[in-house]
Image: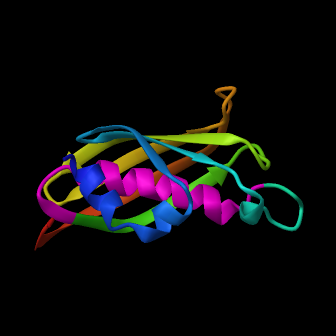
Amino acid sequence: MTNAERLMRDDYASQALGIEIINAEPGDVTLRMTVRRDMLNGFGITHGGMIFSLADTAFAFACNETDTVTVAAGADITFLAPTREGDTLTAHARRVSRTGRSGIYDITVTNEAGDTIALFRGRSRTTNMPLD
């Protein structure tokens, strides 16, 4: 079982969002989520928090590369295009840098046409706690 699978097993928020693991390698993870009606905001487009959650989950799974818990030290996102109900979003996370206990990961969120709809950068910090 990969670390991503171990994390997803107990990640009830990501399960509730319908997030699926497509590929999971240390420092490189791809996830997918289909936008549902309950994920839309008052404008009929995907709520930014839902897109952030998908990207943040990809970040979490990518930065937990070892058997030690790694958490977010910070993150930011830029929304580039709207998505709507029924769209399938893919988040691809990749390690940019990992030095000591600190890491930087870039996550690109695309729609089913391959258009980039959001860019996310996460900064991680590794703890001393074992990843169960």
| Most frequent secondary structure within the magenta stretch | helix
The residue that appears at 50% across and 52% down in the rendered structure is: 19
Residue 59 placement (x, y as % from top left): 39, 53
Region of the chain picked out in magenta, as a range: 46-69
Position of 35 relative to 26 (above/below):
below
Q: Quadrant of the C terminus?
A: bottom left
Position of 114 relative to 110 (above/below):
above
Residue 96 placement (x, y as % from top left): 33, 40
Residue 62 placement (x, y as % from top left): 32, 48
Q: Is residue 85 left or right of residue 8?
A: right
Front position in the image: 39 or 127:
39
Residue 117 placement (x, y as % from top left): 67, 41
Position of 83 relative to 6 (above/below):
above
The residue that appears at 19% across and 66% down in the rendered structure is: 69
Front position in the image: 80 or 9:
9
Is residue 61 part of the magenta span, yes or no? yes
Please, which residue is most extreme toward the right here? 43
The residue that appears at 75% across and 56% down in the rendered structure is: 46
Q: Is residue 37 left or right of residue 53?
A: right
Is residue 83 part of the magenta span, yes or no? no
Front position in the image: 123 or 61:
61
